[in-house]
Amino acid sequence: MADDELLRLESIYKSFGRVNVLDNINFQIGKQEIVALVGDNGAGKSTIIKIITGVHRPTSGTIYYKGKDVTKNHSVKRSRQIGIETVYQERALADLQTMWRNMFAGRELTDRFGFIKIRKQRQETERMLRTHIGFTSKALTVDVEVATLSGGEKQGVAIGRALYFNADLIILDEPTMGLSLTETKRLLDFVVDIKEKGKSVIFISHNIYHVYSVSDRFIILDRGKIAGEYAKKDITHAELENKMVLLHKTGRIR
Ligand SMILES: Nc1ncnc2c1ncn2[C@@H]1O[C@H](COP(=O)(O)OP(=O)(O)OP(=O)(O)O)[C@@H](O)[C@H]1O
Ligand SMILES: [Mg+2]
């Protein structure tokens, strides 16, 4: 394993019944690196993410995290414990709860009797809002119901939560979907910020402008296979876009 490696997928295959969805996927994610996964609808991007986060078990293949083979007992819970967090646009947070409850959903701070430490959770949520996200708005308090937040704010809270729990790998699957221009700009700033904090990001988006502006490397998926992989220094925005169009039209990348 290279010193700067955080995650590596080796020969990952995934089938649902008789449908092969992932066909020999191999790639690695470096420490403090932003890697984009791009490709058409149904290419297999979200399935790869679900394998990394333990939602799905690969049909075969190996997942290495920080140099260790974690394939065997991988699960959603395990992946969070070892420092992998995912932020989805839609299901980023549970709507009918206050921010302070959401922040600790599934990993509540409890006392020795198993009761939730409400005061502590509120304080910590407050701290997360101010330090990790830089929310200064007076309207945005820990008691606000998540349903009233804008899409961008929800996204920000979900990222803040990931940082609070000290994730090393933060996965963003279509994070800019449905966001306004300013919210998108803010989200992209968050992504760069995550990297500056020494962490790694897997970024999935259909918007090549967004992808290109923040990522260090691009992995192009096509019908379950990796069709190409490029460092940003080796490819211009226009070239990347052309490859995507070509792939869509001809099924080939050159
Ligand atoms: N649980 C499942 N059962 C059966 N087929 C599935 C399942 N999950 C995904 N698939 C299939 O696997 C393929 C890849 O899906 P996936 O969601 O990974 O694509 P994607 O690249 O994320 O696409 P999009 O850009 O539209 O989100 C699709 O053909 C999809 O129908
Ligand atoms: Mg998807």
Image (cartoon, rainbow, N blue to C red):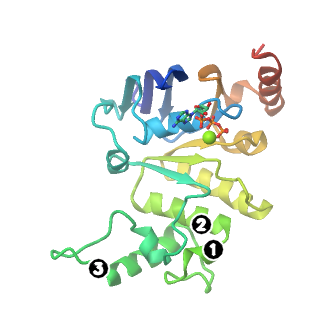
Under mark 3, the amino acid is Lys
Residue 66, percent from left and from top: 35, 35
State whether residue 4 appears in this view.
no
136 in relation to 236, above or below:
below
Q: Residue at x 40, y 80 (%)?
A: 122
| CA gap, disc 2 and disc 1 | 6 Å
Q: Residue at x 51, y 67 (%)?
A: 94
Q: Most extreme residue toward the left, as rendered?
A: 112
Q: Residue at x 25, y 73 (%)?
A: 110
| CA gap, disc 3 and disc 1 | 24 Å
Q: Secondary structure at mark 1?
A: loop
Tag 1 residue: 149
Looking at marks 2 and 1 on the same chain, the residue that comes earlier in the sequence is marked by 1
Q: Secondary structure at mark 3?
A: loop
For the residue pair 53 and 168, the one nearer the viewer reads as 53
Cβ atoms under marks 2 and 1 closer than 8 Å: yes
Q: Where, by quadrant of the figure, is residue 37 drawn?
A: top right
Quarter of the image where ligand 2 sits:
top right
Tag 3 residue: 117
213 in relation to 24, above or below:
below
Looking at marks 3 and 1 on the same chain, the residue that comes earlier in the sequence is marked by 3
Residue 98, percent from left and from top: 49, 78
Specify the quadrant that holds the C terminus.
top right
Tag 2 residue: 154
Question: How many other residues sit within 10 Å of disc 2, few (<14), some (14-19) or many (≥20)?
Answer: many
Specify the quadrant that holds the N terminus.
top left
